Amino acid sequence: MKKFKISQTQAIVIGFAAIIFAGCILLNLPISTKSGYSIGFVNALFTSTSAVCVTGLVVVDTYTHWSVFGQVIILLLIQIGGLGFMTLATLFSLALGRKISFKERLLIAESLNQYSPQGMVKLIKDILLGTMIFEGIGAIILSIRFAGQYGIKDGIFKGIFHSISAFCNAGFDLMGGNGQFSSFSTYVEDPVVNLTIMALVIIGGLGFAVWEDVYKTRNFSEFRVHTKLVLVTTTILVVSGFIFFMALEYFNTETLQPLSLKGKVLASMFQSVTPRTAGFNTLSLPDLTNASKLITMVLMFIGGSPGSTAGGIKTTTAGVLLFAVISVLRGCKDVNVFKKRLEIEVIIRSLAIVLLSLFVIISTTIVLSIFENATLFEYLFESTSAFGTVGLSMGITPTLGRIGKLALIITMFMGRVGVLTMGMAVNIRIQKSDTKLKYPIEKILVG
């Protein structure tokens, strides 16, 4: 009898799917809701997928609908999804004193987008320590801020919940008491809340490998090319996004115009940072100008960085293709980044990720256009948000039918796992190409 084997990519996909299904069962229990009635399988599956895939798209308001039990389940799913199930499984094995096998190290490396399985156990420990430090500091700051308004008990819970949600780039919030689906709109001019949330989102979206490199090296010139590309691309996206939102919304009476100068600056910064797969908002998204909505979609599509809690095509993918375009315009045959030449495989992989991602988003938009009743722009925005695991919404997600919700569930899952990982997991018989066989070169016309 032939022994059934699964690849590393298949193990990652199956692991995420198993956690989502377990979360769905728990959220479908009557005890998970304040009303005491089951939310239904599809809605529970949607919420569980959104939490594990650290997206933030919701079919019901998290604060007003879910009980404390349900909110805790969502929080646990966010933490598991943000760190990755392999990270937590490894920590659990270490706690039991079990030795991590080489095969398991390979799987950890694959799940964390690492090149080598060496040092994976130490990296896992560093990830846990870093996560505890950042989430802990964020929770303390937010708890102190919220305790005065909501009371000590509720304030601490909100502080912990939003710190984890922000660091994991999840976008779930418990601010429904100020208005359903209001997110942090009532804190638009609050520097403590804004700056804390933004810091957690950015740090969580940089990637664990970048943390390690920055901590050990602490000198930009000595950073690895990956770290340099992540930091430079992230800075460019945040700064350019801030400038665009400030310019495009400054005189918009529904968004920035009524705010003070401090409020305008904070809101523009917040709106530039959170589309990087975080999903919080302090401005009403439907009231943004069309240009701002388009900029938001671009930021959502790019997302965070590899090996982080964020989604999207990743900053390095966008950076690699940008440098490739610059090389073509300069007439260079090689793509050079920070005085290093990139392998052609990296460029091809980046191009494949972008094209596959666009295919998924367009396919989801088409499905929503067929089965739902809203505008094409709203479908495209929602699809991009789901794939980028962002969670920002034009407000149509709660109104979607069963097919629309299932389409977004699949899109969120593919966005979190990764289109290449998903593709390789489905293609069971994928094999490495025979490097000895090379076909004749042929030229074609492009451009």
Image (tube, rainbow, N blue to C red):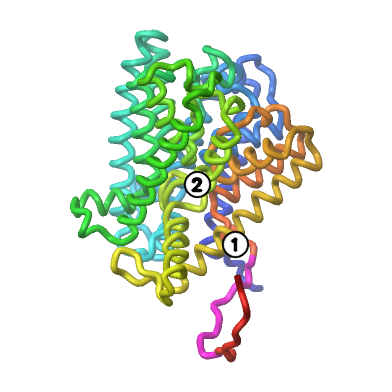
| Residue at figure coordinates x 77%, y 41% from the top left | 369
* Label 1 or label 2, whichever comes before in sequence order: 2
Mark 1: which amino acid?
Ala
Farthest right residue? 370
Dot 2 falls on a residue whose secondary structure is loop
Dot 1 falls on a residue whose secondary structure is helix
Question: Is residue 72 visible in this depiction of the protein?
Answer: no
Quadrant of the rendered image containing residue 330: bottom left
Task: For the residues labelled 1 and 2, say whether their Cβ atoms are less than 8 Å apart.
Answer: no
Looking at the rendering, the stretch of residues picked out in magenta corresponds to: 427-437
Q: Is residue 283 left or right of residue 131?
A: right
| Residue at figure coordinates x 37%, y 18% from the top left | 190
Judging by the rendered image, the residue that carries numbered circle 2 is 311
Q: Nearer the viewer, residue 350 or 36?
A: 350
Question: Which image quarter is the C terminus in?
Answer: bottom right
Q: Is residue 434 magenta?
A: yes
Q: Is residue 47 left or right of residue 163?
A: right
Q: Nearer the viewer, residue 8 or 104?
A: 8
Question: Residue 227: image x %, image y %?
Answer: 31, 55
Question: Residue 362: image x %, image y %?
Answer: 68, 50
Q: Is residue 89 magenta?
A: no
Quadrant of the rendered image containing residue 59: top right
Question: Residue 6: image x %, image y %?
Answer: 57, 64
Q: Give the crowd class for mark 2: few <14, some 14-19, many >=20 residues within 10 Å.
A: many
Q: Which mark is residue 425?
A: 1
Q: Which mark is residue 204?
A: none
Q: Nearer the viewer, mark 1 or mark 2?
A: 2
* Mark pair 1, 2: CA separation: 18 Å
| Residue at figure coordinates x 29%, y 29% from the top left | 137
Q: Main secondary structure of the magenta part?
A: loop
